[in-house]
Amino acid sequence: MPWRWVLSLTVTKRWAAALLLAAVGILHAQAETQAATPAQPAFVLDIKAPTAVREVLERHLEIQRFRDLTDLDDNELARLLPAARQNTVDLLATMGYFSPTILLEQVAAPADGAPRHIVLEVEPGEPTLIQEVHIAFSGPITSDESAQAQRARIQALWPLFPGQRFTQAGWDGAKQQALRELTRTRYLTGALASSRAEIDPQERTARLTLTLASGPAFSLGTMTVTGLDRHDADLVRRLARLAPGEGYDQTRLLEAQQRLAASGFFDSVFMSVDTTGDPGAATVVVQLRESKLQKLVLGIGVNTDTGARFSVEHTHHQLPLIGWRAVSKLLLDGSKKSLGTELTGPPDERHWRWHTSALVEQEQSGSFEVDSVNLRAGRSLSGDHIDRAWYLQYERALNSGYNAPADANALSANYVWTRRAFDSLIFPTRGHALSAELGGGMTLDGGREPFGRVRARWMGFLPLGDRAQRGAAGGVNRTSRIAARAELGAVIARPDASLPTTQLFLTGGDNTVRGYAYRSLGVTLPDGQTAAGRYLAVGSLEWQRPISVNGRPSDWDSTVFVDAGGVANQPEQMRANVGVGAGARWNSPVGPLQIDLAWGVATQQLRLHLSMGLTF
């Protein structure tokens, strides 16, 4: 039986540090040896120009490559100078300077074997400004009424306008952006038909002309799938959700590829469109490599909410007879311990899945320890932006501790709806998300009492100011922004109804009210202990601002924030517990890392909070 083993482990090793120190020592010794006998350069180039121009010339002038030739004689150096002058002219032209004043000369021969001295003085003059821009189209896009919005979008996103400074890099980048926008939707084989930049050096103006040839409009046809062994092609089509006849959209294709990769059934996924056939029914080619039938993942980590963390997770991708996937997990997370399994069926024609799960858990709930059992069965649908789920649930909660609440059982029916409208699901900088949970059921202890439960969560990002440059790890343009969170919850039942503690609310911790311990905010009992309550309210405001390094935005953000939240058994008893602080965000390759230092106003304590990934 094929297995896949994965070990996730982070450990600091003494021998690793020792090897690093040894390597540094060797490099330092080599550097000292080389410094002791420096090579004599053939010449020294002194560039006198405005800072931005000087930096470009220092990096890109071809003559710089000849400095280390120890046998370069005077005649050869003299032959290099005219080429260096022309090279300077060409480089200045790429920066938009077409009428520069350039002085390049060799200073009198040095004495005592010192390197020869070359001086390059540059007065770039006034930059060339864009006077006129004309963007034209050719091919079917010109007569297709449905492509009017796409044509308008290409022109609206064009970054060069009259009055702006002309540079070759900006011109090349603008052309590539226009071509990407053309080929991103419908016109897969679009090309740059012609481009022309007419420069008038005397007037210092540039006239830009660009023609984009669309080629035929592509629509999706049948899907061909390769690389399948255990699974069938229908599963791939249902997960991809690409309907025959829909227009080609690169974003839709990438989303389909991501859904297949995130399904867990496949180790690798590559999707493309065959452009050699009929554009009206282009074949979608899907190349897959199936995951191993079974996978075991071991995890070790640290959580500032609960402490050390250890987990063992086993996945069986296709159970015998029923063909469902089973995921079983053992988690030891500080005071929280759980063992559970979840069975999930393949998606049907409408993309809904059946699922069932069982979970046994022990967790600190305020001042008490709760042992719980949760059994669940229902259906779920995960869409591009909206997720839905409904399920029946049985739960039992056993409380232990001094004056602990009574044990309780309940049976309930629940519906969950979630909508995400972020510009990026991993590194969001704008947009919002909303989740609503609605449930109702009957208690099974101390009489059959009906109850209802509602919970709503919202998160939003509001950009401020101009967009920053694209970060290396972040997939979107980042800017200063306001991040806000809100959460409300309520359990409606008779005051004497015996409700499971798992149906009630607690708050506090990394992603709720920072400055307070995990699940430490609840209802304060007469003896001073904390218990879960029937009403919950949490709010947060955070200012996130990109950190620049050497004038360029990095993948780090600085933050300041204020959180507030509370739990009560009656709405009028609600009291806000406030936390304030500052922190940093790193857009790492595996998701955002959140580092916060928060002050709990009510407890007068400072707490460190660390978390990975976007929690919603």
Image (tube, grey):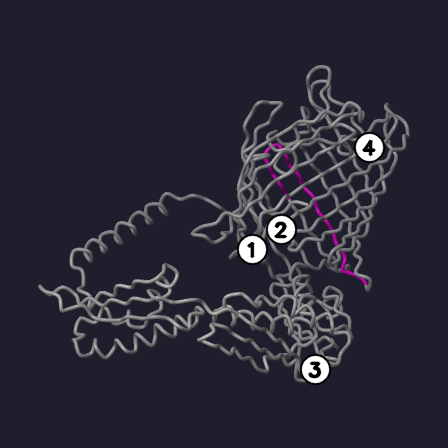
Q: Main secondary structure of the magenta part?
A: strand
Q: Earlier in the sequence, mark 4 or mark 2?
A: 2
Q: Which residue is mark 2?
A: 429
Q: Which residue is mark 1?
A: 474
Residues 95 and 548: in front is 95
Q: Is residue 63 left or right of residue 115?
A: right
Mark 2 closeness class: few <14, some 14–19, many ≥20 residues within 10 Å: many
Which residue matches tag 4?
491
> In front of the other: label 4 or label 1?
1
Q: Give the image location of residue 318, x and y in percent.
A: 70, 60
Instruction: Look at label 2 and name its amino acid.
Output: Thr
Tell me the number on the disc at residue 216.
Answer: 3
The reply to whether the C-beta atoms of the residues labelled 2 and 1 are less than 8 Å apart is yes
Q: Amino acid at mark 4?
A: Val
Q: CA distance from mark 3 to mark 4?
A: 58 Å
Q: Residue furthest left?
A: 112
SS state under label 2:
loop
Closest to the observer, 7 or 471: 471
Q: Quadrant of the N terminus?
A: bottom right
At 51% from the left and 57% from the top, the residue drawn is 472
Query: Which of the 4 quarters of the picture holds residue 523?
Result: top right
Query: Percent x, y for residue 66?
Result: 25, 72
Q: Of helix, strand and loop, which one carries label 4?
A: strand
Q: Earlier in the sequence, mark 3 or mark 4?
A: 3
| N-term-proximal mark, 4 vs 1 | 1
